Image: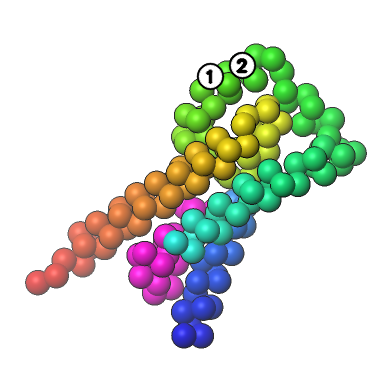
Amino acid sequence: MFDYAVKAATAWFLGFFPFFEIYVAVPAAIAMGLDYTSAVFWTVLGNYLPVPLIVLFYRQLLNHQRLGPWLAKLASPRAKGLLDSYGPWFILLATPWIGVWAVAVTAMALGIDQRKLLLFSFISISLYAVALAGLIAIGIQVVQPES
């Protein structure tokens, strides 16, 4: 039980930590010996947690002396219009590629609806984690076929 808890906590942390996120966390969790369901669950949980934290503490980010002015410059009318039109697609496609931290802060700066951000980032992270775990499973079967 302790071994599982350590592996789950490590998978969660790798998912949470910027730059590692889902693409490092899922393969690492599987390599540590977690089953595919646990690997996906803990990495998605870790990778998704920054989104509600950013939504919750975004106002404090605006008050930061260096981040506040930079975030205010992001909110151009053109960018806001594009995000209003294509926001869910942007979140679905960009979250795993750009990173959940950057997408969440950018989406909040551009004024996307918080519920859309929370929902579509969760869907995006979950889909990419399941797809990644599936590709790993296929790759393992190709490399080590069962006789």
Left/right placement of residue 23 relative to residue 103 reads left
Image position of 12 with respect to 87: above or below = below
Q: State the colouring used for the structure image.
A: rainbow
Residue 100 point in image, percent of width and height: 58, 45
Q: Residue at x 75, y 41 (%)?
A: 58
Front residue (pair 14, 116): 116
What's the magenta bit mostly, secondary-structure-wise?
Answer: helix
* Residue that badge 1 annotates: 85
Residue 80 picture quarter: top right
Q: Residue at x 84, y 30 (%)?
A: 69
Q: Amino acid at mark 2?
A: Gly
Q: Amino acid at mark 1?
A: Ser
Q: How far apart, in angstroms, are the residues tagged by discs 1 and 2? A: 6 Å
Quarter holding the C terminus is bottom left
Front residue (pair 94, 118): 118
Q: Residue at x 35, y 57 (%)?
A: 133
* Residue that badge 2 annotates: 81
Task: Give the farthest residue toward the right.
Answer: 65
Left/right placement of residue 73 relative to residue 49 reads right
Q: Mark 1 falls on what kind of element?
A: helix
Q: Which residues are magenta?
A: 21-40
Residue 103 point in image, percent of width and height: 60, 38
Whether the residues at callouts 1 and 2 have beta carbons within 8 Å, the answer is: yes
Image position of 27 with respect to 64: above or below = below
The answer to if 29 sits in the magenta stretch is yes
Task: Give the farthest residue toward the bottom.
Answer: 2
Q: Mark 2 falls on what kind of element?
A: helix
Residue 98 point in image, percent of width and height: 56, 39
